[in-house]
Every structure is written in C-alpha cells, then in structure tokens.
Amino acid sequence: MSAYLFDWASLLGRWLHLITGIAWIGASFYFVWLDNSLLPPRRKELIDAGVGGEVWAVHGGGFYNAQKYKTAPAELPEPLHWFYWEAYTTWLSGFFLLCLLYFGQAEIYLIDPSVMALSKAAAIGIALAFLAGGWLIYDALCRFFFQRSERALGLLVAIALSIAAWALCQLYSGRGAYILYGATIGTIMVANVFFVIIPGQREMVRAKTEGRPLDPVYGLRGKQRSVHNTYFTLPVLFVMISNHYALTYGAKWNWLVLIAMSVAGAAIRAWFVMRHKAHERGGKTSPVPLVIGLVVLAGVIAALAPRTSTSTQGAHDPAAVAQRFAEVQGIINQRCVTCHAPHPTFAGFPAPPKGVMLDTPEHLLANTVAMQTQLATRVMPIGNLTQMTDAERETVLAWLRDGAQR
C-alpha cells in the first residue's frame, strides 16, 4: 500500500508541476514577446494618457489591443491582475518532488558511491546549500552589476552556473546532479519573482496609490530579472526531461554535456527574443545565436555517438553463441531482474522501471538498445544497488556490441 500511495504522490506532484510550469512559462514567454513587440502609439489620446507602446493581435476569434504605460495610468484600474502564483506553485511542487524522490530515496536517485560516498544527511544538506547558495551568489552579482555591464554580468552568471554543473557532477549521480542543477536555476528564477519582481511591482502600486513619484529603479530591476528568467527557461526544461535520457547524464563528461545543453538552450532562446524585435531591424534577425545553439547541439550529438564494434567473436559457432548468451543471461538475472521483472523483488519498485522487463530471453533481446545505453553510461543498475562488477558490465556490453546473439 505504501508503494501504491507513493506512486500516486509522485504522479499528482508531477502533474501539478507540469500544469503550473506551463502556466508560468507561458505567461513569461508571452510577456517577453509583448514587451519586445510594442510599437509607439499613433492615437493622440493614448499618447496623452501616457501609453508608451501598444500591440495588436488576433487570437481565438477576437482582436486584442495590449498597451504598456511609460509609468502608470492616471488611475489604477480594478481589478489589477498579478502573475506570481504560477511561479510559486511550480517551485513548491518541484521541491515536493525533489523531497519525495531525490531526498526521500537519496540512496537510489541521488547518491552514487562510485562518484562520492556521501551519507544521506550529507547529500541532502549539500543539495540544500546549492539551492540557497545559487540564489545568494546570483543575486549578489546582479546587485553589483546593476546598471553597469549586462554583458559582464551574463558572463559571470554563466561561469558560476558552469562551476555548479561541474561540482554537482563530482558529488552526485548524474541523474541527481542534473536535477539539482535544474532545481538551483529554478530556485533563482522563482526567487527573482518573490524577492525582486513582485516587491518592485507592489512598491510601484503603493507609490501610485499614495500619489508619490514612481522610482524607475523598480521597473528596471524587474525587467532585468524577467529577461534573465527567460534565458534560464530552456536549460531548466532540458533538465526536467533529462532523467529519461541516460546518454546525457550518464556520459563520462556529463558535466560538460550539461553545460553545453544549457548554452544551446540559452542561445536558441536568445534568438527567439531577438526575433521579437525584428521590426526594429527592418524585419531581419541575426541567425548567429540560433546557429551557435544548433552547432553546440550537433557537437553534443556527435560526441555522445556510441562506438560500434566489428567483432564477430563466436558468430559462426552455435555452441559458443549459446554459451555466451547463457553467461550474459546469468549476469542479467543476478544484477537486473530484481527490478526488471513483472513483479520486482527489490524494495521500492512496485513495477519494472519504465516497463522494461529482462526476465526472459525474449524480453532481454527486445531491450538490447536500451540496455547498451544504460550499461555503457553506468546508469544501471541504478546506484549500482545490485553491485554489478566492472567485469560483468564489460561482458554484457561486449555481447551487445557484437550483435547480441542467442
């Protein structure tokens, strides 16, 4: 029953995280597009009212006219819509999942003794320090470089995140390191909303309500953090799905893969943001950021391409083929079938992970491609809980590379 309830908690947590994440990212992407697509108003009444830009759009069978004021309207309208619970709920649901899976089962998903033999308490404590420390370092950089040099700030933030990616991959399993990297960036993003963007907006509303002049610094800080958040989005989304792709987090240089995928995501997002302002450049947008992102992606794909084998060991000797298969099946039965069976016997697994079963020759032969990736990257057995030896791993991999004959 506990495993059944755990599955439901995981399912509902993921569902909520996905729903609120879509709402947050959707609103963020829309407002970035909106802000960059504004054109100076043409009607005199709008100019006189203090409107700094407007944009027309058609959607869902209707026409929309969005306007942005240079400071604020003469009178604040009611109701005034705010956008923050999407961000807060996304982070809260994500932290719930982090606690449920990666902290609650740290020995399975977070700790890898072959990387570093951490106790469960130490692993969780260091992870929480990364979440808090990431925000503190980022915020300090933003405050120091505010209205000084955005390029220098962007470079230093990129360096800091690269160091974090490397450090996490030296401490945790690849899967755990990737998730913690995404959680660190996600914490920065929601902290931007909680500590900078929303307080700044509330101060602007108070100033308008009290008849005080609006200090433009609040709007400038909010805009800066909002732009940063949009560049963080694609790297975080990559991390959210990375646990399904062991070829990335299980790579030998997994920290470099993580950095490269983050650079690619940020560069591609930068191209989209630039494209929003194409009207300022005669409808043209430089392809450089997009090309950089795609080239980096292509480089990662090429670097992670599996090695092929031309060995034909025992290919024409049926007895040798059968003996080799029996040896491989014995290893799989001992090290993998405890989880990858219709009814796993390993504690904590109510069903075979990803539905993969290796309990029969037919099931084993049907999953050779996935097995090769998982074993070559050392992702499976997860956390090496069944203590597969290097010799056993190489025996199975050699059989897979030679064509997985039975």
Image (cartoon, rainbow, N blue to C red):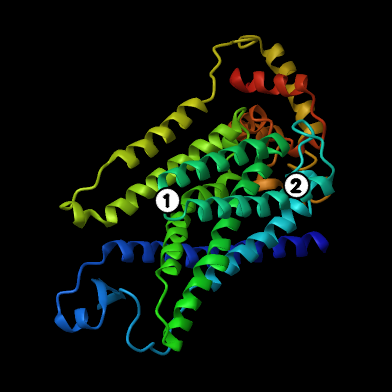
Residue 71's quadrant in the figure? bottom left
Name the residue that disc number 2 marks: 126
The image shows residue 379 at horizontal and vertical percentages of: 68, 35
Q: Height in image: 55 above or below 121?
A: below
For the question of whether residue 401 can be seen, the reply is yes
Left or right: residue 289 versus residue 301 is left
Viewport quadrant of the N terminus = bottom right
Q: In which image quadrant can residue 292 be found?
A: top left
The amino acid sitting under disc 1 is Arg
Residue linked to disc 1: 148
From this view, report whether residue 17 is shown above or below residue 341: below
Please give left or right for residue 202 compared with residue 384 in the image. Answer: left
Q: Which mark is residue 345?
A: none
Secondary structure at badge 2 equals helix
- Whether tag 1 and tag 2 are in contact, CB under 8 A, the answer is no
Residue at screen point 28% across, 52% down: 275
